[in-house]
Amino acid sequence: MTRPTRPTPPRLRVGFYGTDGIAAGVAERLAGVGHRITAVVDPNRADLHTRFPVDDAVGTGISALGGCDLVLICVTDEELSEAVAALVPYVSSRQMVAHLCVSAGVGALAPVAEGAALVMALHPAVYPVASPDAVGVLRDADALEGAPWIVSADPGPPEGVAEVLVAELGGWPVHVPDVERPAFAAGLQHATEHLMSVIDDACSMIDEACARGGGSGEGTGRSLLRRTSRRMLEVVLSDPDHAVPGPVYRASVDTLRWQHDRGIPDGAAARSYRDLARRTAELTPFGDIDIELWADGPSDGGRETGN
């Protein structure tokens, strides 16, 4: 007895408004499962053919989006409202419209919602592992494999379509109501851009110390921190009750002050160090009021110079 096969969802004509972020990777994956990219429109880019996998048959004028079954808006969060307003005259009742911005939900698509068949807010919760190419485009479609997607859509067909689309992109859905999108966005920002800033600062501290000591300096921090940073991420993500030995967890304000005053000459990095020391103290099981008071003190409080 043969096992019944699931019906393949209809293959769609897909149009992109905007080419920011990982839009090129999304297009590559959609094309890989049989959808057709029939329109790519970006009023801010004149070099579409180098930024996106388009050919001469793909429409690049905004009116070409009217012939698409699905329109994906791939612009920055700040540009979303302007993009939605520009699309209003071109959306019809047989079309689906989705945006890929992280901070906003389906409410941001209200101006086109009445005219469209359904609207969705989708965002891949993944930081692309590839570097931008020569023209600044992230083409890493592999980064989408197994990625969670933040999904906001009305119950019923919109949610169902969103889940199918995310599955075809190789991901899995995390349903988030509109009102909670900013919180998810803040968490992702904190865990990506802000984490990278902390690691960059830490590497610079070590590189500069190495250079002052007569070494080559450059690259030393990354070599030293590669295993430690990865291990810390594994611990904090796998064990919610993690305990990491270190001066903050040992409630040693004197050690923190010594490191801060003698080891961090850069004012911006020193400020970040104090802020994170305070937050880490707040998160420890018993807290440490001495560390919190020190971190809240004057920015140059007690900074020593010399030997």
Image (cartoon, rainbow, N blue to C red):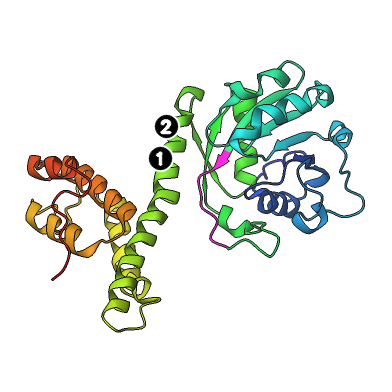
Disc 2, disc 1: CB below 8 Å? yes
Asked if residue 128 is among those painted magenta in the image, a careful observer would answer yes
Instruction: Measuring from the top left, give residue 167's x and y in whole percent.
Output: 60, 44
Q: Hey, what amino acid is under mark 2?
A: Ala
Q: Residue at x 75, y 35 (%)?
A: 71
Q: Which residue is mark 1?
A: 187
Q: Which residue is mark 2?
A: 183
Determine crowd level at label 2: few under 14, some 14-19, many 20+ residues with C-alpha closer than 10 A.
Answer: few
Give the position of the C terminus as an image quadrant. bottom left
Q: Residue at x 85, y 35 (%)?
A: 62
User: In the rendered picture of this protein, how many numbered marks are placed on residues?
Assistant: 2
Q: Which mark is residue 171?
A: none
171 sits left or right of 110 in the view? left
Q: Could you say which quadrant of the image residue 161 lies in? A: top right
Q: In this picture, is 17 found above or below 58?
A: above
Query: Magenta stretch: dominant SS?
Result: loop
Q: Residue at x 45, y 27 (%)?
A: 180
Q: Residue at x 9, y 52 (%)?
A: 253
The residue segment tinted magenta is 123-130
Q: Hey, what amino acid is under mark 1?
A: Gly
268 sits left or right of 181 in the view? left
Instruction: Measuring from the top left, give residue 185's x and y in whole percent.
Output: 47, 37
Q: In this picture, is 77 found above or below 94?
A: below
Could you say whether the residue bearing mark 2 is in a helix, strand or loop? helix
Asked if residue 134 is among those painted magenta in the image, a careful observer would answer no
Could you say whether the residue bearing mark 1 is in a helix, strand or loop? helix
